Amino acid sequence: MNQTMINPPRINPRRRLNDALLGWKMRGGIRQIVAEIMERGSKNAMVVIGATIVIILIAIAVLAPILPIVDPTLQNGNALTKSPSSTHWFGTDTLGRDVFSRVVWGARISLFVGTVAILFSLLIGMTLGLTAGYFGGKIDYLISGTIDLFWTFPAFLLALAFAAVLGPSLTNVMLAISVSYWASFARLVRGQALTVRERLFVEASRALGANNWRIMFTHVLPNCLAPLIVWASIGVADAITIESSLSFLGVGTQPPAASWGYMLSSAKTFIEEAPWIAVFPGIAILVAILGFNLLGDGLRDVLDPRLKGLRR
Amino acid sequence: MTADSTQVSTESSLVEIVKLEKLFPVRKGVFSRVVAHVHAMDGIDLSIKKGETLGLVGESGCGKTTVGRALLMLIPPTGGYTFFETPKSVVDNFKVLVSVRDSIKLGKMTSSDALRVADALSTLFSSGECDIADDKKKHLCKDADKIRESASRLATMSDRMKHEDDIRKVIESAILEVARKYCINYKDKSRLKALRARMQIVFQDPYSSLDPRFTVERIVGEGFRIHGPPKSMSGDRATVEREKIHQLIEQVGLSESHLTRLPHEFSGGQKQRIALARALALEPDFIVLDEPTSALDVSVQAQALNLLKMLQKRFGLTYLFISHDLSVVEHMSDRIAVMYLGKIIELASADEFLSNALHPYTQALIASIPMPDPKLRKNRKGIEGEVPSPINPPKGCRFHPRCAYVQEGCKNIEPPLVDVGNGHLVACHLQKVPQRPAEIKTPEPSQEATSSFGPIRVQLPGKDA
Amino acid sequence: MTSEKKPILEIRGLRTQFFLQEGTVTALDGIDLTIYEGESLGMCGETGCGKSMTAFSILRLVPHPGRITAGSVKFKGIDLLKLSHDHMRGVRGKRISMIFQDPSTSLDPVFTIRQQLGEVISLHQNIYDKDALDARILDALKLVRIAAPENVMRQYPHELSGGMKQRVMIALALSCSPELLIADEPTTALDVTIQAQVLNLLKDLARKTGSSMMLITHNLGVVAETCDRVCIMYAGRIVEDAETFELFARPMHPYTMGLLSAFPKLGEKKEELAVIRGTVPNLMAPFPGCAFVDRCDRATELCMSKRPTRVVVSPGHFVSCHLYPAGDVKPNDR
């Protein structure tokens, strides 16, 4: 007799997507957003400048360990407080450490803190906001109340408080930023979800028999993402500011790790004699914040009117 | 109130609606107290036969959109019963039970009513029509016999009130049993999901009824993600789905190259075709068309309507065609129902409708339509007064404030929907109103249209309304 | 039939274009139009044909990035396109006024009806005395048959129904007795019974005040009921214009004929509606010939290469179609 019927192979939907010859954009969903950004963003000056800065920063941060630069913690007794020269591009500080390499490694810290903290709060905020906005009713009431509660915490003061209670460390800084930031994201997503769930295609999905989870994650969420991307970028800029400020005050990154803020604080007494120790980290902070802000603002121009002007 | 429709047909209808009701609460004040209700649907009775197109017309606020959505359980009704593919005898007996229950509530029950109840109960439960637990069945049959016995003594009973109440309780439990088994709005989620594949909807606004982030292929194929691959074809899942999607796209007049595009690249008419393809994917028997062509240009509308007719013939579909445009409805429908402020006030076949519209509102509606022929230019005045709001509708006949033929009785008693012959139903105290274009009434202060409540918040249907 | 009346608005060769990143959209491509005193003209066509843009061009309200690039709009001899901005403002609202489509968005929600009407009246008629102004406002509201005008005056737009809001818009538009009233789809957003009321109102008022009316709509039934003359537009061009009775009795242009048969008429038993195949052309791509050529069953080689000129087929009836080669074009009739 015949073998038992062989089940039809479970086709991996991802494989099917990759089979498309017409490129990412034609596959809708998240890929569409990415492709849209790349296409329209390349025409927008702010996006281009911002993205360039961000990409360079990320590259520097990621590649720092393998770059041919001096160890940032190495104290060279022979080169104390030297002004910028060909061997030390940004000069050295009072302990003989190469400022250039410390700036490079500082990028690593700032970006790490910024992106991880924001990513974390993004995930929490997005999930809670989506749930609140989509389901409404009591769930919304509860979550909105929580959002309102956390909304009032200013990230900076919270971080100080954490540092005071839990001791100063990078993790605590990230925690503090996340705790206060998730509320903004949640609020944003909730607002979007409230609008999107009223759209007819959600009802059409329901008429097809889709359950709530499917509707939430395949229909509502992708339509909420655009403003989220903008805010996330600006949020990273904010997070870098906070981290730098905290390190400046001494409650963030601890020495000998090279954080820009800490470099600034240790250089402030020498500003007149050895300005380079403060100026370069200062510029680095400026550039980083500028880059992320530009990217965010540029993306806002690219994504928002695009969403509204989809007709004709 | 009761649709005393003596249906002449012998076959069962595909969709049957009994006293469907949807009230939205209106909340006001700091504590969101419910001060009034929006009577979107107030006891609707409809039956749609397989293969026919039933047109539903009315102006804004009449509740026609709500009917379509409530049928598909996109808006859960607050009362009433919807049946899908239920045997005729079950539905007819069910209607008897419901009508007698209402009579009891009004204190107007007669002994013949009791006999009808008894017969209905016996038919439903003893003959195995309604498949419920055996012990419950026996119980109900016994009750049926008791009721039959005491029917003749009803008028002379001393404890008549209590007896009627007992009967009412029996009726209620019987209704509940039938509803649980057959009614769409009593079904639990899993059974409802299976039913959804057979009843679909096409919306009015093509721009927002398609997810702007989904490709056409994904939109049309969404049904398969939820219910599995189309059962009418065999083969491995991906190929079968792809084939079916291609078929659907071609059936609605688009081409394969459109599958990978996004909705915003299409015109309104094309978007409606995509929406139609999506609705047809699961091979439904019944489609609610909620103003499908109102947002389209005339020439595109013509294409869409022809397509709908063609598909109906080809697949044997049943349509509920909702629109405010009487010309389009008349073109598409076999029978037409007119709604006003949450009630059906007239129902007739399309021919009968035009030649013999009986309700003054229907007549005025027909007279208000601008005809594309200047030779037919008359001094049509329409109906004076504003379209009233469905919050706290007028007492008695809901149309009486605007009716040119209003009488005293119209202001207090609501006219029932009665059959005047040929399946033509009207809800008007003056059924045989001579056909004249609506006359001018002196305009009344249209205070109804303004909200004397001040700022009010109407709780619209959310997910868990 | 038409020669005794004086023309109040003469448009010649009007061209309006939108300069977008992706290309140039020619919304209006050389419009020739005349409106006479005291008559109502219906502008009929489908979405994108340019009928609303004609109205905006007349009033020079074309939104950025659009511009009027050619032609003249003579209002009682004055070329509106050559007026200064200040002079144009004097024309708008006072001599030519416009009613828009959606009454719920055309009225400012934070002002009462009295304030909105009062603003327009006082600006254009220089009445600043409160009582005189109130009297004028009441007159305007009574003119549009609003019941209990004293109450309505004090209300805000959101407290009124759609039909009433549209009447207020009409009152606003007519408050300064304009010589030309442009109504852009005034009844599309209204229920059919209210629509009949509003259209009758418009007709009566136009007749009473002697102003001309330009009614823009896509509904041929509305045009048949209300207008003296009809103008059919397609893809930014006028393809046919004639008196209403004449147009419906003897449509000449294939598009007009197609439109008339595609319209479902009450009481007419048809299995299928006649369809105009194809879709509206892309206004960004310039087409040298007739715009309708892809969808016309009677297109010829000539139609693809040469643009048809506007010719007279009978007194007062003009068509732009190669089926009717150029005959005598009497300059006075245009």
Image (spheres, coloured by chain):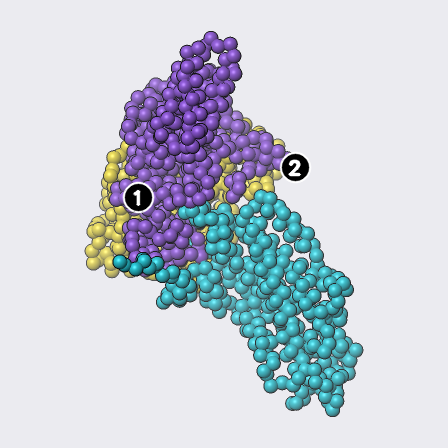
Chain colours: A cyan, B purple, C yellow
Q: Earlier in the sequence, mark 2 or mark 1?
A: 2
What residue does disc 1 label?
B308
Q: Are marks 2 and 1 on the same chain?
A: yes
Query: Which chain's residue wears label 1?
Result: B
Label 1 CA crowd tier, 10 Å (few <14, some 14–19, many 20+): many
Task: Describe the element under mark 1 as helix, strand or loop.
Answer: helix
The N terminus of chain C lies in quadrant:
top left
What is the x, y in percent for residue B47?
35, 31
Q: Which residue is situated farthest in the right direction here?
A: A269
Residue A307 visible within the image = yes
Vertical arrangement, residue A44 with respect to residue B213, above or below: below
Q: Nearer the viewer, residue C190 or B358?
A: B358
Query: Which chain's residue wears label 2?
Result: B
Mark sitting on residue B21: none
Write the residue at 62% across / 56% down: A184
What is the x, y in percent for residue C311?
26, 49
Q: Nearer the viewer, residue B13 or C58?
A: B13
Q: Amino acid at mark 2?
A: Val
Write the residue at 41% across / 32% down: B132
Q: Amino acid at mark 1?
A: Leu
- Horizontal side of A275 relative to B293 (left or right) equals right
- Horizontal side of B64 relative to C233 (left or right) equals right
Vertical arrangement, residue A69 with respect to residue B198, above or below: below
What is the x, y in percent for residue C266?
30, 34
Write the residue at 76% across / 84% down: A94
Q: Which residue is situated farthest in the top direction here?
A: B156
Residue B339 visible within the image = no
Write the residue at 59% across / 31% down: B35
Q: Nearer the viewer, residue B403 or B384?
A: B403
Vertical arrangement, residue C250 with respect to residue A225, above or below: above
What residue does disc 2 label?
B30
